[in-house]
Image (cartoon, rainbow, N blue to C red):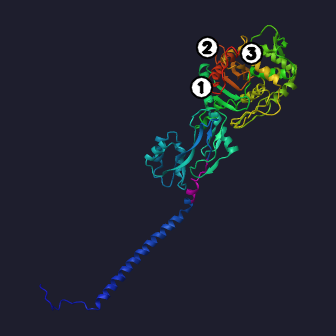
Amino acid sequence: MAVVEGDPAIQRPRDGDVPRQRQTRRLTETGVFAVLFFAFAEVAIQLVTLALSHQPNVTLALSEPVATSFSRPDIVDRNGRLLATDLQAPSIFADPGVVLDRDELVEKLITVLPDLDAADLRRALSDRSRRFVWVRRGVSPKTAQMVHDLGLPGLSFRYELKRAYPAGALAGHVLGSVNVDNRGVNGIEKYIDDKIGVDPVHAATLSTRAPVRLSLDIGVQHALEDELDDAVEHYETDGAAGLVLNVKTGEVLASASLPRVDPAWPGKYLDEKHIDRMTGGTYELGSVFKTLTIAMAFDEGLAKPETIIDVRQPLEAGRFTVKDFHPAGRPLSVAEVFTHSSNVGAGMLALQAGPEKLQGFLRKLGMLDPLNVAGASVVAPQVPPAWNRAATITVSYGHGIAEAPLQFAAAAATVLNGGKRVQPTFLRKFETGEAVGKPLITATTSRQMAQLMRLNVTSPDGTGGQADVPGYRVGGKTGTADVPDRGGYASKSVISSFLAAFPMDDPQYLTFVILFEPKGVASTGGRHTAGTNAAPVTGRLIARIAGELGVAPMNTIASQ
């Protein structure tokens, strides 16, 4: 239908109606906004209430992951080569409240972390009141990425400090290890905690402390461990230990014990087979002890190298009879008692001195009391409960008294350096560092013992000929000690050792090689005595390290 102007069906708005309609729309819009505002406010209130109702879990979540770690100074060798340092490593943790399927999480984690304790992790994830559970701390970036790629809800990562050892297992016993919080547990690492200090941190913040510089020379350390490895394999031993010591300063340039340990895997430190045999065990060392007995006789004025002793008859000590392994069948000079390694001769010298003088001499050299060493813990010696005739005789040739090899080496170094007390250290000395104080023995005694040790290597009758190294004037003493067994000593088990020093015209360095229960092999003619195994190992070691230590070879003829 057409609409024409003037049609009464069409009512045009009056002028006053337009403002009234606009006001109505504004009131409607305001009402809608008010409703929306109060609705969102109600939601916000509910969220706040919900958050407050879970406040205890929030507090727990914040408290559990804050595990204080410790930043540690680097460890370097005497020449600045890096041995230990802190790295920033990812650690994996889980939030049980977010984990959707704990069984799936554990099963998938085991594909990346096969040694994970699945039962323990399941128990931890079952407690929904906890908001933080460690899964694995200090993993490699590759492992962290593999775990991340599993895409498991509830797993997260944080960075912590983790100790790293660039040289691997080299010098592992000396360096020691740290726990999961980067605290030192043993070795140099524990020394750092106890004497130098570490810094607690709540993030992966590296230490700003100066590096700890050791007395070790890594080149010498590598040579020592390499030779001991070969010896263990060749002579089929149960273990080995070795030492290189500066006789003037007491600095330990190398120290090793086999089987070795890796500082990055500290669990082996608890295994008795992996103890540090140089400092952590005491042993009856056998005839190397005659070095001290004869030095005592010289220093007390009881004998000279040319003094004759009738060793043809064995010594009786209670129910024991002491004989020589290879009886000479004639009287021997004191020099020959040393080179022939006569038990009877050493026992006679000890009896002549008496137990009081023998004890006094050994105590003076630090053999009867615990030894304090910077950077290591040394077990206390085991000494006779009573110094009767039997003890006096047996101690003279290294039985009936058990020492840590490092403690014995320190006493021997004192004998060879002119009598200045040697205090071993695993820390580098930056000053001249030579032992000071009143000499404990005379210079004459020291010189005579150096001459006897050299004679034992050069003489056809000596037991140390296989340790000689042309040009380096090596001297030494063998030791083949029976291993204690229930009710006495084992019939076929020995500890063979060779104490050496060079150059013997002015001893600078001492080496001590010990083989535990070596077997008689073809190259030794079936024998297991020190002259056939520990002595040649020593010779090969000195040939490798003498030049590195700055000892120049002399003309072969002049060095005899």
Q: Is residue 86 left or right of residue 278?
A: left
Residue 431 in view here: yes
Residue at the disc numbered 3: 455
User: The disc labelled 3 sits on which kind of residue?
Assistant: Leu
Q: Nearer the viewer, mark 2 or mark 3?
A: 3
Q: What crowding class fits label 3: few (fewer than 14 Cα within 10 Å), some (14-19), or many (20 or more)?
A: many
Secondary structure, mark 1, is helix
Residue 64 percent location from the top left of the image: 58, 54
Say the numbered circle drawn on residue 523.
2
Residue 420 percent location from the top left of the image: 79, 30
Say the numbered circle drawn on residue 226.
1
Specify which label sits upstream in the sequence, 2 or 1.
1
Q: Is residue 380 above or below residue 305?
A: below
| Front residue of 466 and 417 | 417
Residue 477 percent location from the top left of the image: 73, 19
Q: On the rendered image, what quadrant is the N terminus found in?
A: bottom left
Quadrant of the rendered image containing residue 430: top right
> How far is disc 2 from disc 3 in space, using C-alphas?
24 Å
Q: Nearer the viewer, mark 2 or mark 1?
A: 1
Residue extending furthest toward the top? 329
**Is 449 in the magenta?**
no
Mark 2 in CB contact with mark 3 (< 8 angstroms): no
Secondary structure, mark 2, is helix
- The part of the chain drawn in magenta is 59-70
